[in-house]
Amino acid sequence: MSSSGASSGSPSKSSASPNAFINRETLANNVIQQLVRERGDDRTLMSDEDLLASRRALIPDDYKGDIWVFAYGSLLWNPVIEISAEKMGRVYGYHRRFCLKTEVGRGSPGDPGLVLGLDNGGSCTGMALKVGSDQPVHELDLLWRREMLNSSYEPRMVRFFGDNNLFTVIAFVMNRQHPSYVRDYDRETKAKMIASATGFAGPCRDYLIETHHALEALKITDHYIKDLYLAVLKYS
């Protein structure tokens, strides 16, 4: 993943706020994985060996060069990994959508929530985050534990179009074959689910609110997110 002339940009925050449940410690100590198991939703849970194999298939242990990750949702406000630079831009062929049902992190079996995925079609504006550690592969392994734990996403190399820059980023794309993939819920159904659900990572509505605020702070216009945010406020 050569940066192809991409400049560094200003450093981003390297971790979540102290109150965020999904953080470096809970990921490194497999706390999230254990909570998923305790709730009996380990049907698609990936083992440490599976996670390592998945990461190595995309980025080998001896990889040399810059590594960039595409942030479009919670990675904008809770990246967890060490970041040394960030660039705003767009990827094509995917769009940001609440299309992943969650019965653990942001919901429960009796009251599931919804979180974001990169679904097929359109385009998506977000941030390319440059992994800034002197051990970037270690940072990626933390990221894999966060994003790939239950195989709901597919890690892919995609082209990122920034201002006068074109380079490659890691993007976690929705796995449309996953049993929790949501195809066609209408806005009101999604809003009610997001407004009421909560899980070990916190209320689902907070996930949407944080994403909405992050996009506004970056001056990224996303009418879908804003409309859903306003709809959720009616039920909260």
Image: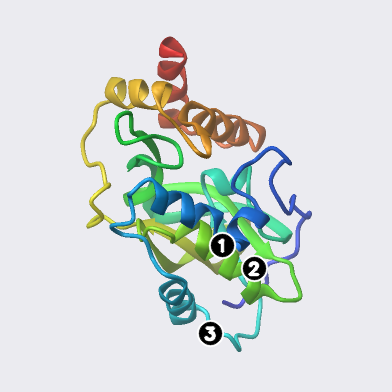
Q: Position of residue 65 (x, y in %)?
A: 65, 81
Label 1 CA crowd tier, 10 Å (few <14, some 14–19, many 20+): many
Label 3 CA crowd tier, 10 Å (few <14, some 14–19, many 20+): few
Residue that label 3 marks: 60
In this view of the protein, which residue sits in the foreground, 189 or 220?
189
Which quadrant would the N terminus be assigned to in this image? Answer: bottom right
Q: Is residue 101 above or below residue 81?
A: above
Give the colour scheme of this rendering: rainbow
> Which of the labelled discs sits on residue 82, or is there none?
none
Q: Are marks 3 and 1 in contact (CB under 8 Å)?
A: no
Residue shown at the point (51%, 62%) measured from the top left: 145
Residue shown at the point (32%, 27%) measured from the top left: 190
Q: Which residue type does callout 3 highlight?
A: Pro
Q: Position of residue 192 (x, y in %)?
A: 34, 20
> Which of the labelled discs sits on residue 139, or is there none?
2
Q: CA distance from mark 3 to mark 1?
A: 15 Å
Q: Secondary structure at mark 2?
A: helix
Label 2 CA crowd tier, 10 Å (few <14, some 14–19, many 20+): some
Q: Is residue 199 left or right of residue 133?
A: left
Q: Is residue 48 above or below residue 8?
A: below
Q: Are marks 2 and 1 in contact (CB under 8 Å)?
A: yes
Q: Is residue 204 left or right of residue 65?
A: left
Q: CA distance from mark 3 to mark 2?
A: 13 Å
Quarter of image, res 92: bottom left
In this view of the protein, which residue sits in the foreground, 197 or 232?
197
Residue that label 1 marks: 143
Chain-order first, disc 3 or disc 1: 3
Q: Which residue type does callout 2 highlight?
A: Glu
